[in-house]
Amino acid sequence: MTIRSELISFRTLNLMFDVSTFLRHNFARAWTLASDKLTSLEIGYISSVMVTELLSPTPGPSQFLQQEQPPILPNLQKLCLSVDYITDTMINTISQNLTSLTHLDLRDAPIIEPRVTFDLTNNGLQKINQNGKLKHLSLVRSQEFLITYFRRVNDLGILLMADLCASMESISLGGFCRVTDTGFRAIIHSCTNLYKIKISHGTQLTDLVFLDISATPLSLTHVGLRWCNLLTNLAITHLASNLDLTVLDLRDCRSLGDDTLIAISSLPKLKSLLVDGSDISDTGISHLRERAASSLVSLSVRGCKRLTDKCITALFSSTSKPVLQELDLSNLPNLSDNGVLLLAKSRVPICELRMRQCPLIGDTSVMALASMQVDDERWHGNCLRLLDLYNCGRITALSFRWLKKPYFPRLKWLGVTGSVNRDMMDALARSRPYLHVAGRGEELGTGQWDHADGFYIHDYEEMDELERYILEGDDVVSDEEMAEAEDNEEFED
């Protein structure tokens, strides 16, 4: 099936691959056949030059004598692109040609430091939202290949943009290293309809931006402040005056500690909290106990080095039933099997549990989770749909025996170290066709646009083994291969 045939009637189109492999001229011409009804377009990777050509294709020889060509994608409202460089030319082309655009999401990942002609500057920011319809804007420079920033944008560019974006509801900015508190405050004080703001790699962002946030009419629900290392507990204390906050992403803000959790504990609607790499302790996390029992659905404390097994008892009370479904305990050097045993005893209905890079986690943890029951159901480990044990220091072949049927019947994603017990892992994958086994260290369940920045719970569309078993009343897979792999493992030992 060609791209041309795909473009005729779709309202939403996601091309999650590298379209730069297509001939640029042919690719641009194909879009002239795109349906006028297309309202949403997402492309996994495309060059900025191709974007410009897509929206303003060069006419063929027979077209020179014709009248003005109809606009490309006239009703497109949402555009999400991953490009090589976000440039002034591309921004200007998008603004001029996509007159119905309300949602613009651009992310680049330069492999070399961009030259001025292939970069975003203050001039480019002035071209954003020329039609005044934009409600959601995301401009992010990824550091996947190179530590680089939007070095040609400063406070002036942000001030000019803020004047044009007063009706904006969602703004995400990543990699604006020359923007100071002046620029960021302009956004907060100019965009009075803002409910979602995300800033990453804000190297000059300080507490001053949030000191008077209670004086604004903002009612923020989603806030992301990632890799903003100048922020302290004081900023979060003032930010917590927004009692409607449901998603709070404070990953890699390393100066934040227990006082941050005290402030956060007052947020009655908080559903998702990420405090990876912060300086919180077991005592501090106890302030989240009430939230875990009432509203908190997703919690990530990855890389919080001070946390120990005691954080489990500090977080979960024996007198209440937590609503927490997603828990990330990865990269905690002091988390051991004892902590997982406490988690299993608490009978928390965890659906996603990540414990990758934990050197003290071993077979005992797998056995405890496999035996865990929730709500007196007979299916052991029935709640877990994602379990990440990649590079856990004490996982051996014994764990794979507990990953067989009938344990973990709802498990859809499993992360393990593929270089160890390879035969066992392959046999497990073959014997449980409904289980996605990952062994290369890839993150499980995260999408290209980093859903973890917002509130996100997996939508498991495929039928799992438990559902299949209930419907068919019979075994759906055979254990012969697993038994053979175990025999081989024992023989090698």
Image (tube, helix red, strand yellow):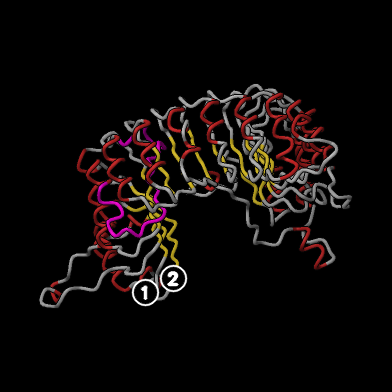
Q: Earlier in the sequence, mark 1 or mark 2?
A: 2
* 351 to 289, vertically: above or below: below
Q: Report which quarter residue 415 is drawn in.
A: top right
> Horizontal and vertical percent for residue 223?
51, 41
Density class for disc 1 (Cα within 10 Å; few <14, some 14-19, many ≥20) is some
Residue 459 appears in the figure: yes
> Horizontal and vertical percent for residue 428?
72, 48
> Horizontal and vertical percent for residue 380?
84, 48
> Horizontal and vertical percent for residue 61?
13, 73
Q: CA distance from mark 1 to mark 2?
A: 8 Å
228 to the left or right of 54:
right
Question: In the rendered structure, which amino acid carries the disc numbered 1?
Answer: Ser
Density class for disc 2 (Cα within 10 Å; few <14, some 14-19, many ≥20) is some
Q: Which residue corresponds to the image point at 78% horizontal and 58% vertical from the top-left?
A: 466
- The magenta segment is 126-150
Question: In the rendered structure, which amino acid carries the disc numbered 2?
Answer: Arg
What secondary structure do most residues of the magenta stretch adopt?
loop
Dot 1 and dot 2 residues touching (CB under 8 Å): yes
Q: Report which quarter residue 471 is drawn in.
A: bottom right
The label number, if any, that marks residue 11 in the structure image: 2
Q: Please state, as top left, top right, bottom left or bottom right, where the N terminus lies in the image.
A: bottom left
SS of the residue at dot 1?
A: loop
Residue 148 appears in the figure: no
Is 200 in the magenta? no
Q: Please state, as top left, top right, bottom left or bottom right, where the C terminus lies in the image.
A: top right
- Between 285 and 87, the residue placed more toward the observer is 285
Q: Which residue corresponds to the image point at 32% horizontal and 68% vertical from the top-left?
A: 73
- Between 291 and 209, the residue placed more toward the observer is 209
Q: Which residue corresponds to the image point at 80% horizontal and 62% vertical from the top-left?
A: 469
Residue to which mark 1 is pinned: 35
302 to the left or right of 153:
right
194 to the left or right of 51:
right
